[in-house]
């Protein structure tokens, strides 16, 4: 079956992914089963998406109920699930208002537009440039790939938008020097995900906030990968006692359903008035109903606490592997966003783990990334560590 599926895919789909030769037909909790019935323990979670696991019964029930009630109406009208979801996010965060889209890239597009519009409305239209970080990742639309600090993402799409400046992550001196009269905002991930699970140095994010305040510019946190519990807090910024002016979310917000969100403080959010931005499917009832139920599960099952506990345990087990294997150079991360840097190409390790029934991920060629559902248990962690111990040997 997989051979036929691959042949059909190769004939009909754009070749934008280097897919591995496996097709999944079913998932539950932290496990996936391929079309031949082989079981895998999932430490990828749809790339930090399925934070409460696959096929959660409460989300499935809400989806079915909402599908029988109301799938979609235009944002020209009010709908209950959208308003309830926005209210929940406002209550739990720094923000006063929420804009819904369909993906992380859309959320970042909205944030970049809002930053420009904010200064335009203040009569400072000369402020339009955004400072981003080297090795960052913000999306694949023209604006968001232009904001991304990785040349490989931009290759073939030049010329990209010339309104972004780049500085090294964790270098506050470089940031201060780069800010100019035309700078309107700084955008960064509190922890760089695709860039290699790179954490901020102590005091760095606090210093970024101070620099932005002193320069009178906005601070945008891209929490598309770090948000919704992934770092052991609901939002990563809570780990550092720093609030942004704008924050973007996606991935785990819908636990697999396509949704993105941009959150902002009232003063900044007021720059978006009727007609200034829109999304046909943004905040549509069936998606927001599922997202709201996902967040209720977080509360009822204390998912964030579980992530924090299991993340600490998992990191210690990875450090144990580092002591045992010279090929392991570094262990990094927070919560259940963890990375293990090795002294060789990591793709062969990913493939060997998959053969043994474990799904892991490799980024930047030599960093193994572990981003499992936040409900992962110690037994599953120990089993993966035993697998890695064997493979690394």
Image (spheres, helix red, strand yellow):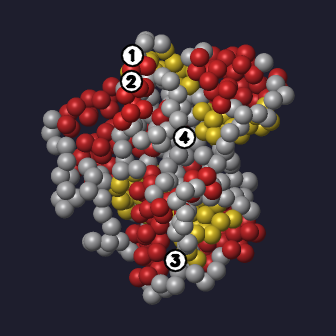
Which sits earlier in the primary sequence, circle 4 or circle 3?
3
Which secondary structure lies at badge 2? helix
Which sits earlier in the primary sequence, circle 3 or circle 1?
1
Which secondary structure lies at badge 1? loop
Kindly identify which residue carries mark 2. Answer: 5
Which secondary structure lies at badge 3? loop
Kindly identify which residue carries mark 4. Answer: 230
Kindly identify which residue carries mark 1. Answer: 1
Which sits earlier in the primary sequence, circle 3 or circle 2?
2
What number is the disc on residue 128?
3
Percent position of residue 75, x then y: 22, 58
Left-right relation of 352 to 89: right
Locate residue 52: give its quadrant.
Answer: top left
Q: In which quarter of the image is the N terminus?
A: top left
Tell me how far mark 1 sits from mark 4, CA to CA: 35 Å
Locate residue 371: give its quadrant.
Answer: top right
Question: Which residue sits furthest front?
Answer: 11
Evaluate whether residue 222 shows in this view.
no
Above-or-below relation of 245 to 80: below
């Amino acid at each position: 079956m997989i051979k036929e599926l691959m042949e059909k895919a190769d004939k009909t789909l754009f070749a934008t992914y280097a897919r591995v030769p496996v097709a999944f037909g079913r998932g539950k909790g932290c496990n996936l089963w391929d079309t031949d019935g082989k079981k895998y323990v999932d430490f990828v979670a749809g790339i930090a998406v399925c934070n409460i696991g696959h096929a959660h019964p409460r989300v499935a029930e809400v989806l079915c109920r909402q599908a029988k009630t109301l799938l979609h109406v235009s944002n020209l009208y009010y709908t209950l699930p959208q308003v309830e979801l926005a209210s929940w996010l406002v209550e739990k965060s720094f923000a006063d208002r929420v804009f819904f889209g369909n993906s992380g890239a859309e959320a970042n597009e909205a944030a970049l537009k809002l930053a420009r519009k904010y200064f335009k409305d203040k009569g400072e239209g000369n402020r339009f440039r955004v400072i981003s970080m080297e090795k960052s990742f913000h999306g694949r639309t023209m604006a968001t790939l232009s904001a991304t600090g990785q040349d490989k993402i931009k290759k073939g799409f030049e010329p990209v938008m010339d309104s972004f400046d780049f500085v090294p992550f964790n270098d506050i001196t470089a940031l201060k020097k780069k800010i100019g009269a035309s700078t309107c905002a700084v955008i960064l991930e509190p922890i760089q995900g695709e860039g290699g699970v790179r954490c901020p140095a102590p005091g760095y994010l606090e210093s970024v906030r101070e620099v932005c305040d002193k320069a009178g510019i906005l601070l945008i946190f891209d929490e598309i990968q770090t948000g919704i519990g992934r770092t052991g807090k609901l939002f990563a910024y809570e780990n550092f006692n720093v609030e942004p002016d704008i924050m973007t979310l996606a991935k785990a917000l819908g636990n697999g359903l396509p949704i993105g969100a941009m959150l902002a403080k009232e003063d900044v959010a007021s720059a978006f008035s009727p007609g200034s931005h829109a999304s046909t499917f943004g905040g549509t009832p069936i998606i927001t109903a599922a997202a709201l139920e996902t967040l209720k599960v977080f509360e009822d099952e204390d998912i964030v606490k579980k992530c924090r506990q299991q993340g600490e345990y998992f990191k210690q087990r990875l450090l144990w592997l580092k002591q045992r294997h010279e090929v392991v150079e570094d262990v990094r991360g927070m919560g259940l966003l963890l990375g293990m840097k090795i002294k060789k190409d990591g793709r062969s390790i990913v493939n060997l783990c998959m053969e043994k029934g474990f799904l892991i991920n490799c980024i930047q060629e030599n960093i193994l990334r572990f981003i499992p559902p936040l409900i992962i248990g110690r037994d599953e962690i120990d089993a993966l560590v035993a697998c890695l111990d064997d493979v690394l040997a």
